[in-house]
Amino acid sequence: MRRLGTVISISRAGNMILRSKTVPRIGEDVYDSQLDRVGAVCDVFGPVIHPYISISSERDDPKTLLGKPFYLMESGKKSSRKVY
C-alpha cells in the first residue's frame, strides 16, 4: 500500500481533490486507511512535481473525507510513476 495524499477539497461535481507526489493512472482504485475503496482516479492536473488528483467518490457524502489520507494498492508491477 502506498500513500497517495490527503483530501484538501471537494469539487462542485462532488469529486475529492488531493495533492500527491506520485502520478497514478486514470481509473486506478483509491482506498482509505481501513482498506475500504473510496473511489477511482478520474483526473490528474496541475504542476508536474506535485500534481493534483481528482477522485470520483463512491460515498454519499464525500465532505466527511476532508483531511483523510488515501492510498493506492501496490501490485507486482509498477502501477504509477514517481515524479522528480
Image (cartoon, helix red, strand yellow):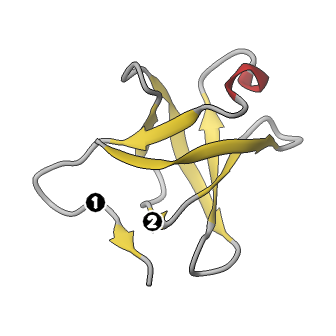
Quarter of the image for residue 77 reads bottom left
Q: Is residue 78 left or right of residue 2?
A: left
Question: In the rendering, at what x and y percent does residue 78 appear?
Answer: 21, 63
Q: Earlier in the sequence, mark 1 or mark 2?
A: 2
Can you name the residue that lies furthest to the top here? 60
Q: Which residue is mark 1?
A: 79
Q: CA distance from mark 1 to mark 2?
A: 10 Å
| Closer to us: 23 or 49 | 49
Q: Which residue is mark 2?
A: 22
Three-letter code for the amino acid on which mark 2 is drawn: Thr
Compared to 5, does 26 lie above or below? below
Tell me if 24 is positioned left or right of 66 in this view: left
Q: Locate the N terminus and report the quarter of the image it occupies.
A: top left
- Residue 35 lies left or right of residue 43; in this view the side is left
Instruction: Find residue 82 and report its horizontal and vertical position in percent.
Output: 37, 73
Amino acid type indicated by mark 1: Ser
For the question of whether residue 59 can be seen, the reply is: yes
